[in-house]
Image (cartoon, rainbow, N blue to C red):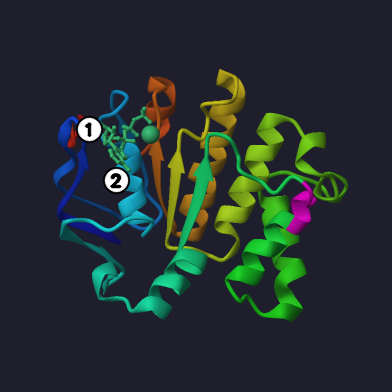
Amino acid sequence: MLSVSHLNKSFSTEGGDVHAVRDVSFSAANGEVVAIVGASGSGKSTLLSLLGLLDAPDSGSIDIDGTQLAHLDATGRTKYRASDVGFVFQSFNLIPNLSALENVLLALEFAQWPKESRESRAREMLEMVGLNDQKAQRRPAKLSGGEQQRVAIARAFAANPKLILADEPTGSLDRSTGQKIVTLLRQAAATRGTTVLVVTHDDKVAQQADRRFEIEDGVLSELA
Ligand SMILES: Nc1ncnc2c1ncn2[C@@H]1O[C@H](COP(=O)(O)OP(=O)(O)OP(=O)(O)O)[C@@H](O)[C@H]1O
Ligand SMILES: [Mg+2]
């Protein structure tokens, strides 16, 4: 269970303060896919970076399965970033000179997954996203965009995180490939009990989620 309470984040800029996330509170159950829509600059990526501990809020709290992120020490934060949260980006962000399999293996190494089961775990994840052993050996450049995003999803789920943050995961894909990617995210989330937050500009993608929120000028509200 993800529980966010009264979260705030401002940036000081030359043009004055930007209140990017304003008193945001919501919760999401394990296995649930939540879509977040909103105009450019409304605060979507800022919210994800707070949830991923890439940036610190000015106030408010984030609780995941009973752990307050603000209470983690440096070691706890490192463990959280490596094992408890996964990221999926619009531009896939795979390491170009590593094969699909090696990209997933590297995430497992960062997460200190037991050495003897890394390879079987990585293969299980690639199989989950529909990539066979032959494709697992290819570098990202030899895979289609949809296949690269499948690798990124396999990598995000590899260390069995509690939360996956996906920022425009279908933004570089055609609509039908994008819908398959969201279906895949939903199945993996439900099967593994992972909460998935998907930022999207695509209404069709948002419609596939279990719940939908809109963020306007930093203020989050649930859509019917
Ligand atoms: N590091 C930063 N320093 C200053 N201002 C920032 C910083 N990061 C974000 N902002 C500002 O905060 C606001 C929210 O930005 P954010 O990136 O969260 O928007 P977004 O909803 O993800 O937009 P997009 O759909 O274009 O990706 C914007 O006004 C942006 O300019
Ligand atoms: Mg953004």
Q: Amino acid at mark 2?
A: Leu
Q: Quadrant of ligand 1?
A: top left
Mark 2 or mark 1, which is nearer the start of the sequence?
Answer: 2
Q: What percent of the width, then of the height, locates residue 23?
A: 11, 47
Which residue: 32% across, 24% down? 40
Which residue: 39% across, 71% down? 77
User: Which mark is drawn over residue 191?
Assistant: none
- Quickly name the residue at label 2: 47
Q: Which residues are magenta?
A: 97-102
Q: Residues within 10 Å of mark 1 (few under 14, many from 20)?
A: many
Q: Is residue 211 visible?
A: no
Q: What percent of the width, then of the height, locates residue 183?
A: 53, 36
Badge 2 residue CB within 8 Å of ligand 1? yes
Question: Quarter of the image holding residue 172?
Answer: top right
Q: Would residue 138 be found to the left or right of residue 170 on screen?
A: right
Q: Quadrant of the N terminus?
A: bottom left
